[in-house]
Image (cartoon, rainbow, N blue to C red):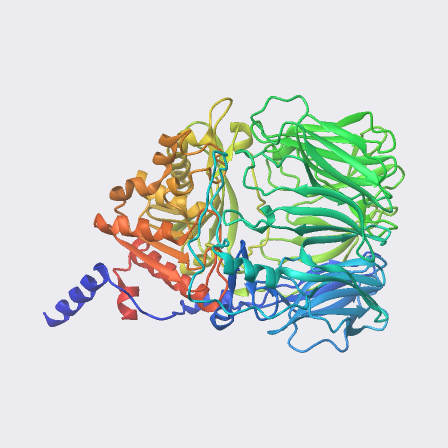
């Protein structure tokens, strides 16, 4: 009797609403060991294709590292101790490997405790540069790839607050942003200077929700102090000069001939409503002494951009250097006021101007919104345009020397992945800039190769004169293999990354004319304990006929006669304008099982079937908007996946848990509110009340006032009284993602609690929208495992009781 009372007491203690200060927990070893597995190095090929840089990835930082000082202003996360971003991802090791003889080279004189970012090769492939981050400064380092010696290139501290801190000016010189010499930042006065006032005098200024904005005049002072930088140039031999005066540089880009600089500088007035990239800007071309060679544009404050996914600013935008000319700037200007709701036959025009910038030339007029350029040579360039409402995309081929004509190369829906022609292969030209790799008047295209049988990456040759496409190579089962780099255009030799469900990715050298392949790397399998996990891509239909897919993972050693398994369903909804596009197969059955920090696949080692990447298409064909029937399509998609998995005998439909991150968390809450398919749910870093994002969210561009019923029905907050299944909420305390303020979870949890629901709310200190600290990730997994074991697998609260 006494034992029964103790157990009942523990169960009641778990059910009451209370603070649960358990401290950071470690999940079962089967999960923790996967988190602690070493990460596969990153690879970057030198421009001359002779060596590969192999960069070792860092482990997860500790919570102590994440808790260090951080300044959150102007949409930025700044480390005030070193004038850099506070949440960077670093490489912690570096070595090189010859592509020809596979010999490895260690670099001498590298700094201790490496924290590498912004790694890049010089255009001739003879040098490399990177930033090395320390607690109190960021340093610029270089590597001689002949002697394999590293050295610090300048004693100045780098200012990487706004990114784009370094750029190659030539193969032997680098432009960089240094911490500016300025008076010390005064301490913040506890006595305010006055109230903070914002005013709008009748001007429409809709804006999506942003985080970490400026809030007061002292924030402006801090922003100026940390973002102001001095532009400098350093040569490999140590010669150094300053260029112009200190300013807040959003970007700095040397011209292809290295004689000029294209700069974007932030100017006042600053805004308390939008992040720094929407502050007013001055766009200029400067010479190497800091003199203005041409003032290109005054970009206004971006708080009055029209609402819509194809909305842009009025006036010049997207300034950049033409890659195949010494010093030619090009840019785009909207012809419809930047408003997608305006009727217009021409939406955008692209202009260019060549040094000394005495004239401006129209390059191309576009019926849709400009989407980018790929430069080739004086006779060849590709221009891209797209339009959101009908998902249209077009590619034009133009002759820059005679721009009156444009030739349509591709005209398609960008939702139609089966017709995706891929991307143009580029290589560094004589100016050291990426441009079309042209061989015998032909270029090369690579892509994922989406098809009804899954992704099959390819390499194609495209004839620039005739438009004929010739397939040179395609990934073949039982591998998933894609082109990582084209090594020799004449011989058509190329490096691929190849993997299979049981073989982790490694790099190989291929030649189209030969079946022989050379293995370049031999990275060990990072997860030997799940090497025998079974994976397949399921294909099934929704009740309205839409084709769906999901990646099914089954535990090692599982046999069908073992019976159906408890199942973890994980997804992220996507909007489409056509059922055909929504039903296309994505992914491949031959990919290696990658496990990122946020993956659901970990639980395959705990005996669950995993339905990952399950299709949740939300379709609105013609004049219909996808979200008008969001709930109906959401539930139908989930039901189709569970029913099909049950028909295979592997999914136990009475023991299915659902989970998702961000928009997937929003999905999870809605599924629990509107159906009884799931035993429990896990919602990480989501938004649940759409009235808190009234000027649009995700792919919904209508405002709350234009579609109030849609906002209400799509908000699981509106149905908090209907959620009876247990739900676990996890949210980063410092979430900086637009729309997913932590208050979204806090208020939703309180609403469920107020109606007697079963919910648990976990706040991860210092974490943003994605989680970084090892302690946070381990604890997240412990929480998720407890919920799944308790409510989905049905272990009668055993997991939680044993931790008390």
Front-most of residues 170 and 780: 170
Q: Position of residue 696 (x, y in %)?
A: 46, 37
- Placement of the C terminus among the 4 image quadrants: bottom left
The residue positioned 53% from the left and 49% from the top of the image is: 271
Front-most of residues 152 and 779: 152
- The image quadrant of residue 59 is bottom right
- The image quadrant of residue 412 is top right
Q: Position of residue 349 (x, y in %)?
A: 72, 30
Residue farthest along the left direction in this orientation: 1
- Number of numbered labels in the structure image: 0
Q: Position of residue 51 (x, y in %)?
A: 80, 62
643 horizontally vs 383: left or right: left
Q: Position of residue 577 (x, y in %)?
A: 53, 28
The residue positioned 32% from the left and 49% from the top of the image is: 748
Examine the rendering and report whether any part of residue 675 can be seen: no
710 versus 65 height, above or below: above
- Placement of the N terminus among the 4 image quadrants: bottom left
Front-most of residues 460 and 366: 366
């Amino acid at each position: 009797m006494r034992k029964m009372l103790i157990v009942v007491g523990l169960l009641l203690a778990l059910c009451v609403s209370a603070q649960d200060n358990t401290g950071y927990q470690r999940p079962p070893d089967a999960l923790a060991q996967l988190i602690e597995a070493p990460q596969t190095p990153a690879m970057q090929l030198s421009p001359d294709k002779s060596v590969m840089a192999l960069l070792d990835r860092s482990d997860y930082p500790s919570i102590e590292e994440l808790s260090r000082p951080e300044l959150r202003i102007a949409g930025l996360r700044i480390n005030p101790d070193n004038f850099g971003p506070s949440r960077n991802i670093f490489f912690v090791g570096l070595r090189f490997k010859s592509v020809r003889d596979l010999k490895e080279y260690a670099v001498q004189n590298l700094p201790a405790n490496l924290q590498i970012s912004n790694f890049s090769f010089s255009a001739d492939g003879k040098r490399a540069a990177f930033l090395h981050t320390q607690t109190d400064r960021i340093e610029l380092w270089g590597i001689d790839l002949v002697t394999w010696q590293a050295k610090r290139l300048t004693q100045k501290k780098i200012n990487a607050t706004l990114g784009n801190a370094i750029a190659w000016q030539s193969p032997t010189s680098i432009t960089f942003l240094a911490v500016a010499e300025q008076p010390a930042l005064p301490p913040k006065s506890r006595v305010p200077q006055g109230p903070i006032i914002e005013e709008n005098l009748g001007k429409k200024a809709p804006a999506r929700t942003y985080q970490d904005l400026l809030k007061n005049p002292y924030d402006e002072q801090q922003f100026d102090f940390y973002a102001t930088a001095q532009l400098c140039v350093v040569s490999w031999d140590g010669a150094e000069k300053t260029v112009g005066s200190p300013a807040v540089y959003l970007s700095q880009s040397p011209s292809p001939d290295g004689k000029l600089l294209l700069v974007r500088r932030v100017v006042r007035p600053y805004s308390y409503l939008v992040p720094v990239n929407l502050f007013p800007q001055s766009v200029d071309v400067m010479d190497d002494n800091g003199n203005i060679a041409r003032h290109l544009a005054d970009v206004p404050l971006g708080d009055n951009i029209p609402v819509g996914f194809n909305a842009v600013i009025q006036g010049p935008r997207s300034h950049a250097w033409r890659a195949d000319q010494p010093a030619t700037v090009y840019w785009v200007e909207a012809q419809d006021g930047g408003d997608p709701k305006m009727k217009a036959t021409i939406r955008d025009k692209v202009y260019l101007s060549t040094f000394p910038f005495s004239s401006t030339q129209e390059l191309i007029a576009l019926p849709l919104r400009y989407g980018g350029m790929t430069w080739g040579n004086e006779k060849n360039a590709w221009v891209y345009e797209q339009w959101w409402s009908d998902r249209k995309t077009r590619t034009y081929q133009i002759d820059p020397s005679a721009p009156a004509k444009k030739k349509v190369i591709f005209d398609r829906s960008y939702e139609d992945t089966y017709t995706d022609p891929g991307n143009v292969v580029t290589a560094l030209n004589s100016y050291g800039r990426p441009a079309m790799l042209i061989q015998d008047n032909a270029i090369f295209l690579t892509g994922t190769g989406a098809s009804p049988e899954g992704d099959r990456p390819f390499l194609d040759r495209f004839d620039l004169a005739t438009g004929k496409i010739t397939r040179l190579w395609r990934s073949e089962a039982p591998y998933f293999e894609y082109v990582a780099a084209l090594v020799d255009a004449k011989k058509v030799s190329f490096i691929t990354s190849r993997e299979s469900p049981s073989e982790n990715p490694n790099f190989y050298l291929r030649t189209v004319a030969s079946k022989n392949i050379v293995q370049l790397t031999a990275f060990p399998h990072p997860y030997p304990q799940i090497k025998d996990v079974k994976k397949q891509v399921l294909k099934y239909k929704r009740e309205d006929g839409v084709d769906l897919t999901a990646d099914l993972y089954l535990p090692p050693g599982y046999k069908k006669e073992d019976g159906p398994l408890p199942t973890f369903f994980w997804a992220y909804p996507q909007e489409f304008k056509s059922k055909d596009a929504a039903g296309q197969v994505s992914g491949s059955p031959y990919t290696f099982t990658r496990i990122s920090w946020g993956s659901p696949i970990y639980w395959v080692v705990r005996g669950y079937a995993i339905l990952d990447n399950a299709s949740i298409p939300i379709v609105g064909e013609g004049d219909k908007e996808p979200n008008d029937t969001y709930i109906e399509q959401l539930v139908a998609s989930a039901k189709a996946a569970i029913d099909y998995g049950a028909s295979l005998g592997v999914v136990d439909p009475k023991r299915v848990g659902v989970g998702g991150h961000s928009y997937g968390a929003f999905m999870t809450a809605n599924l629990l509110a509107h159906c009884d398919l799931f035993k429990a749910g896990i919602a990480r870093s989501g938004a649940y009340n759409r009235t808190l994002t009234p000027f649009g969210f995700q792919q919904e561009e209508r405002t709350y006032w234009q579609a109030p019923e849609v906002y209400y029905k799509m908000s699981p907050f509106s149905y908090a009284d209907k959620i009876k299944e247990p739900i676990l909420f996890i949210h980063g305390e410092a979430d900086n993602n637009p729309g997913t303020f932590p208050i979204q979870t806090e208020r939703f949890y309180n609403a469920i609690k107020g109606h007697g629901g079963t919910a648990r709310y976990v706040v991860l200190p210092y974490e943003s929208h994605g989680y970084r600290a090892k302690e946070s990730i381990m604890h997240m997994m412990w929480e998720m495992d407890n919920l799944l074991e308790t409510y989905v697998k049905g272990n009668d609260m055993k997991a939680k009781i044993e931790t008390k």
